[in-house]
Amino acid sequence: MKTSVDVKLKEYDLKLLEKDYDRISIFVEDTKKLDSICSRIDKVTKGSISRAISSTEFEKKSCGDVLTISFPGALSTEYLDLVKWSKSGKPNDARKAGVNLAKKSNHDNILICGSIQKMSEDVIKGYLLRRYEFSDYKNIKNTGTGSVTLMLKRPKDFAKSLSEIRAQVDGVFFTRNLVNEPANILSTVEFSKRLKKLSDLGVSVEILEEKKLEELGMNALLGVGQGSANPSKVVVMSWKGASESIKPLVLVGKGVVFDTGGISLKPAGGMEDMTMDMGGAGVVAGTMLCLAKRKAKANVIGLVGLVENMPSSTAQRPGDIVKSMKGDTIEVINTDAEGRLVLSDVLWYAQEQFKPAGIIDLATLTGAIIVGLGYENAGVFSNDDEFCNSFLKAAGNENEGAWRMPLGPAYDKKLKSRLADMKNVGGRDAGAITAAQFIKRFIKKDMPWIHLDIAGVAHTKSESTYAPSGATGWGVMSLNRLVSDEFEEK
Ligand code: BES
Ligand code: ZN
Ligand code: ZN
């Protein structure tokens, strides 16, 4: 299982430059004025830095880009990475620098000569996030055990920030590891076992089995899983970091461990990607791990609905009518629109049980959101402008794409059923919005709610901002920031 690389903090010491790190990274200002580190290296490498930074190649680079010098003169390091930097550099430029360095240093021991504290936080965060590879099933693994040393003026001041960053990166990696797992390994049973381990960090974890779900009347959720040999489960993870009296923030995730479409079977091409249909549950799990690791002073409850959507003689049929826990009946027109059925019951249970201050659901819900927003932004739907804007701000600060989408009664009308209170699909047009309208029917009046359709951002074929191809862990950092901005006891 992939965990983040070791980070050593070292006091500013020019002698470190002579140690045999595989790579040394230094920041060079675009003013071309060399600081003490750059001057020292320039001297021992007979002016290589001065020459490199006056090159057109360096000129063309932007803030956070890297130019590499191989086997630099008298230094014992193999590579010298020059990071172009500017005084007006933004946190995202620093993260980009970290990402660029990580892409170059797969299994190396590297020294990063840090600059100002705040910028170094973003550099190391970008670096750790990008130094990820899921190679559990490869006999020949690509990654070694390399480490990173960060040289700073005041390393002691950095220790607290580093542990916060590590909590976030560990949360993101937990999500990525879950999302990258194949469905023959990550069954509903295995998923719940991995969540149970969060109790080692002080999260209380309760697993609701099928019998209990039947008693609760979660027939919408159970209908999705009834064709699978793997039992359906709801897992409740509670982190109580604030006073008992403070209402919790509730996170709910779609955890379809594999989505064949059921009897409304998906086409074969690309069906293997549906191992990631538990992405919402993965983000909820990663966020809970992050909050617990950094001991957030907040009350947050994460719930995931774990089911497998399979076609079989016991599977739900198109045309079946199920009664949800809320009591509303649903005509299942298409068994491939299963995520909303799972969420409807878990959302209702969460509101009845925990009386939350606000509720956020995450789901790889529709192909339609990918048609609309591609792989750059998650679709954000909400009934509460203030809550929604807080989330959008948090996502913006974490550089995780999120774009608000509309809701409205005209879309809701499309869910009208001839036989039941509603049907589970609203037609091809505005598919992501009608899915959100369906979920909204299970949100109580006045409950602040955000629905995140993460079908495009949970997993990408090409590399994303912070991750190589595959699972991204999108959302863990934004939700963590939302919690620290809005839900923590000061
Ligand atoms: N899990 C899919 C949505 C999805 C598609 C996630 C692509 C990630 C990538 C979801 O359960 C689904 O099949 N949705 C259908 C809904 C339709 C039947 C109304 C879809 O989007 O086609
Ligand atoms: Zn589906
Ligand atoms: Zn699905």
Image (cartoon, helix red, strand yellow):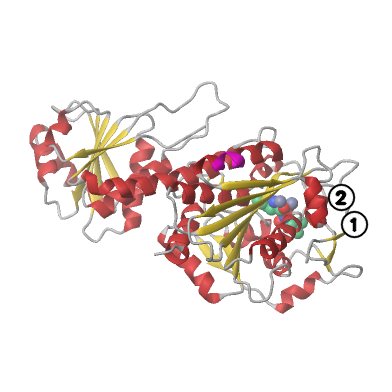
Q: Nearer the viewer, residue 104 or 246?
A: 246
> Is residue 13 left or right of 175 when viewed as pictured?
left
Main secondary-structure element of the magenta-colored stretch? helix
Q: Residue at x 29, y 45 (%)?
A: 159
Q: Nearer the viewer, residue 275 or 240?
A: 240
The quarter of the picture where residue 488 lies is bottom left
Span of residues in magenta: 195-199
Image position, residue 353 (x, y; %): 68, 61
User: Disc 1 beta carbon < 8 A from ligand 1?
Assistant: no
Q: Disc 2 vs disc 1: Cβ atoms closer than 8 Å?
A: yes
Q: Secondary structure at mark 2?
A: loop
Q: Is residue 193 placed above or below 163 in the rendered structure? A: above
Label total for image:
2
Q: Residue at x 70, y 33 (%)?
A: 184
> Is-magenta flag for residue 198?
yes
Visible residue check, residue 218:
no
Image position, residue 278 (x, y; %): 65, 47
The quarter of the picture where residue 191 lies is top right
Q: Which residue is mark 1?
A: 320
Of the residues shown, which amino acid type is indicated by label 2? Answer: Gln
Q: Which residue is mark 2?
A: 316
The residue at the far front in this view is 244
Image position, residue 286 (x, y; %): 53, 47
> Is-magenta flag for residue 245?
no
Image position, residue 293 (x, y; %): 45, 46
Q: Residue at x 56, y 62 (%)?
A: 248
Q: Secondary structure at mark 1?
A: loop
Q: Residue at x 79, y 69 (%)?
A: 415
Compute the Cα span from label 2 to label 1. Answer: 7 Å
Q: Quadrant of ligand 1?
A: bottom right
Q: Quadrant of the C terminus?
A: bottom left
Of the residues shown, which amino acid type is indicated by label 1? Answer: Asp
